[in-house]
Image (spheres, helix red, strand yellow):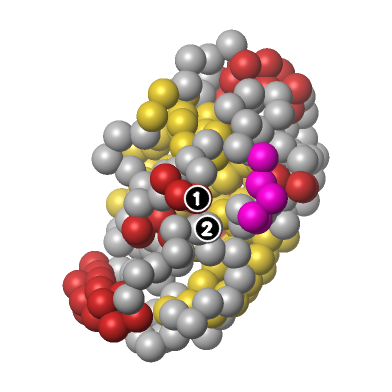
Amino acid sequence: MGAGEPRVMVIGAERAPVVVIDDFFSDPGYLIDCAAACTFGPVVNNLYPGVRAPAPESYVRAVVGRVAPLVYEVFGLTGLTGRTCDFSLVTTRPEQLQLLQAFPHFDSTDTGRLAVLHYLCPPAMGGTSFYRHRSTGYESITGDRREPYLERLGAELKASGPIERTYVNGDTPLFERIGIVDAEHNRLVIYRSVTLHSGNIGRDFEFDSDPRKGRLTLNTFLHFQGESG
């Protein structure tokens, strides 16, 4: 592991913590080599707009060991019950997006689940932004918010007519950007999976499926029993 010191951002009215660690891995080139040797495939039952491949188990163990103290300190979570980890590449062009992929999304309604995003690409590939749904004020979608949020969003989409299939990258009539983490090579970001967010995919984005050239990230999801105390 690298020696970067964690920084904690607090975003939005809900004061959601986001942890940023630079120079996270001591040899990011090794991880890129691993990705280049993988066979990537389409994502099943997930709205990720691209392809994925399993990450090395040694990397997953290293991530868990490094972030476990932060998880307790910053998010108040204990009792790791599961984890998944994949290399990911954004390869879906705007005109091929599903409707929900053109909006900020949440990964889960479980407050005991964390997303750990590790950039293995240069800044030009775009970072990650966090959003507030304007009409509900929601910045995160928990179990009790899911149905009212989806109902309101559905009504707004019906009233607005056809939606341009493009990646959200800033304020829109329905969503307000409330925070941003820029992409930096070997930067790690941790946030709750309930948080509304989206990758910053610009209109001039290069949709490259080569791990050495595209928007390569490592996406880890950690599942915890619940909050401590």
Direction from residue 215 to residue 7 in the image, left or right? right
Q: Is residue 229 visible?
A: no
Q: Nearer the viewer, mark 1 or mark 2?
A: 1
Name the residue: 52% across, 85% down.
13
Q: Is residue 204 magenta?
A: yes
Distance Cα–Cα, label 1 vs label 2 = 6 Å
The x and y percentages for residue 153 are 30, 76
Amino acid type at circle 1 is: Pro
The x and y percentages for residue 159 are 29, 83
Upstream in sequence: badge 1 or badge 2: 1
Q: Quadrant of the N terminus?
A: top right
Direction from residue 164 to residue 74 in the image, left or right? right
Q: Quadrant of the C terminus?
A: bottom left
Q: Which residues are magenta?
A: 202-206
Q: Residues within 10 Å of mark 2 (few under 14, many from 20)?
A: many
Q: Nearer the viewer, residue 160 or 91?
A: 160
Direction from residue 172 to residue 201 in the image, left or right? right
Residue that badge 1 annotates:
94
Instruction: Give the vertical position of 24 relative to 200 (above or below).
Output: above
Residue that badge 2 annotates:
167
Magenta residues, dominant SS class: loop
Looking at the rendered structure, the secondary structure element under dot 1 is helix
The x and y percentages for residue 81 are 32, 41
Q: Is residue 183 magenta?
A: no
Residues at marks 1 and 2 touching, judged by CB atoms closer than 8 Å = yes
Q: Is residue 30 visible?
A: yes
The x and y percentages for residue 26 are 77, 28
Please give the label number shown on residue 173: none
Amino acid type at circle 2 is: Tyr
Q: Nearer the viewer, residue 159 or 25?
A: 159
